[in-house]
């Protein structure tokens, strides 16, 4: 394959055979995802139903909260009756369901601008903003062409687009934090501070930061989180924060005790226990033990001699294992640790079984909507085990692999 000209007349190095295969497979899967979504829309199974009314997908939750902000009623996003009425108004009819708003007030800054548009254009605008952020994060890890291929082909992408959720934004913040970790510590902290809009995804980052002695990143994250919190209180009123705090326990009961959001949709260990019929106390106990075990592993990993790619992959996978609240639309985040492992494999060669394991993880993410089994948990475990296997071998010395 010939090189591609870049500014200055110097040809870019050709893709390796493995990277070229990844790019080709990624292109085919990306096109398949587009065809799937287009076919669903044409058949009236997505966006607009056969009755001409928009589907009340998850995005209606974000849109309705944004509308309440624009109306000067931000705290009402945590009032189920008021927020439910805003959701019905967003799609123009009472759809007989409800998507509660579980996020801190800081996230209202992100969703309010989109509520200036009608519902369906707002959905497209939301995807048009958050999807590229996710793609850039993966490309910054893996390199432009292989990163673009992995990001667009990852099977969580069409599922996230189909419901209009925030998984791309979460993945962009997680991936951006890790991509900036070594060279841009302040930027990494700013991005991590932004991740506080979904605080359960940040549980293990402080462990890794302290273990690695990344004090500038810790300071930047703390300042960013504090500024966002103060700004939200000033913009939306302190009552919005009080309402959020009150809503946390209610959301937990709704999801895990009553299973009203569909317990099979939870891809955490807690969700698996509840899906199997186990008591809530057992689920929380096992989830707590998993968080503790993951924290110990992350601390040892980041203090140890493994290369940065392995450390980042381990943390990216552990982030998903640690959160008790995990839906399929959150799984663009899994592309982050996979990108680091693929980067290592393209640079140094894949270990025996690694490529097959990562492929299996992707397949498990793809299968979930068809089997109604929390397959994402097993996909995450596979990626974590690949990272742990790398960390346990002396070849993973603490040196950067590749040039990305």
Image (cartoon, rainbow, N blue to C red):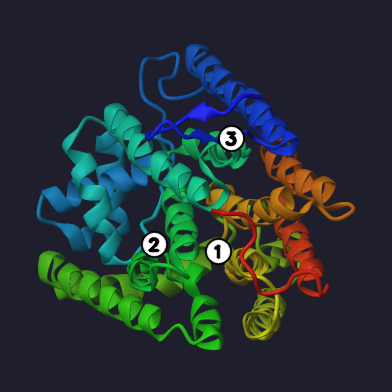
**Residue 297: percent from left, percent from top:** 70, 81
Q: Earlier in the sequence, mark 3 or mark 2?
A: 2
- Residue at the image point whose x is 68% and y is 37% from the top: 19
Q: Quadrant of the N terminus?
A: top right
Q: Which residue carries the number 3 mark?
A: 149
**Which is more toward the observer, 114 or 74?**
114
Image quadrant of residue 89? top left
Q: Is residue 263 left or right of residue 276?
A: left
Image quadrant of residue 251? bottom left
Spatial CA distance of label 2 from label 1 is 11 Å
Q: Which residue carries the number 1 mark?
A: 325
State yes or no: discs 2 and 1 in contact (Cβ < 8 Å): yes
Q: Is residue 149 left or right of residue 387?
A: left
**Residue 165: percent from left, percent from top:** 44, 45
Spatial CA distance of label 1 from label 3 is 28 Å
**Residue 227: percent from left, percent from top:** 21, 74
Give above or below for 91 relative to 384. above
Q: Is residue 252 left or right of residue 380?
A: left
- Residue at the image point whose x is 63% and y is 86% from the top: 303
Look at the image and tell me whether residue 175 can be seen: yes
Q: Is residue 108 left or right of residue 39?
A: left
The residue mark sitting in front, 1 or 3, is 3
Look at the image and tell me whether residue 92 can be seen: no
Q: Which residue carries the number 2 mark?
A: 102
Spatial CA distance of label 3 from label 2 is 32 Å
Image quadrant of residue 125? top left
């Amino acid at each position: 394959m010939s090189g591609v000209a870049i500014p200055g007349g110097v040809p870019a190095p050709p893709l390796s055979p493995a990277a070229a295969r990844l790019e080709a497979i990624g292109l085919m899967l990306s096109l398949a995802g587009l065809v799937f979504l287009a076919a669903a829309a044409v058949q009236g199974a997505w966006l607009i139903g056969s009755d001409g009314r928009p589907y009340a997908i998850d995005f209606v939750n974000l849109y309705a909260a944004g509308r309440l902000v624009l109306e000067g009623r931000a705290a009402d996003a945590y009032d189920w009756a008021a927020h439910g009425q805003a959701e019905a108004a967003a799609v123009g009819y009472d759809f007989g369901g409800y998507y509660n708003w579980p996020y801190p007030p800081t996230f209202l800054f992100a969703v309010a601008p989109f509520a200036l548009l009608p519902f369906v254009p707002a959905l497209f605008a939301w995807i048009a903003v958050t999807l590229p952020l996710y793609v850039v994060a993966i490309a910054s890890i893996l390199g432009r062409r292989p990163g673009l291929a992995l990001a667009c082909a990852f099977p969580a992408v069409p599922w996230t687009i189909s419901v209009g959720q925030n998984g791309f934004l979460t993945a962009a913040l997680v991936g951006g934090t890790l991509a900036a970790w070594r060279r841009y510590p302040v930027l990494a902290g700013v991005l991590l501070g932004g991740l506080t809009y979904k605080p359960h995804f940040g549980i293990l980052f402080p462990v890794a930061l302290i273990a690695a002695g990344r004090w500038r990143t810790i300071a930047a994250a703390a300042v960013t989180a504090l500024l966002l919190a103060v700004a939200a209180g000033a913009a939306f009123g302190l009552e919005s924060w009080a309402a959020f705090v009150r809503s946390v326990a209610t959301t937990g009961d709704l999801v895990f005790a009553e299973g009203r959001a569909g317990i099979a949709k939870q891809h955490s260990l807690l969700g698996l226990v509840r899906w199997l019929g186990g008591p809530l106390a057992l689920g929380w106990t096992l989830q707590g033990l998993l968080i503790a075990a993951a924290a110990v592993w992350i601390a040892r990993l980041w203090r140890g001699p493994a290369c940065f790619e392995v450390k980042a992959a381990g943390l990216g996978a552990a982030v998903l294992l640690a959160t008790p609240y995990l839906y399929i639309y959150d799984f663009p985040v899994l592309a982050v640790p996979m990108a680091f492992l693929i980067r290592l494999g393209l640079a140094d060669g894949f270990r025996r079984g690694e490529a097959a394991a990562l492929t299996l993880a992707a397949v498990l993410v793809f299968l979930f909507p068809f089997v109604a089994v929390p397959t994402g948990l097993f996909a995450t475990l596979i990626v974590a085990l690949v990272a742990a296997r790398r960390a346990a071998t002396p070849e993973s010395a603490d040196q950067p692999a590749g040039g990305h």
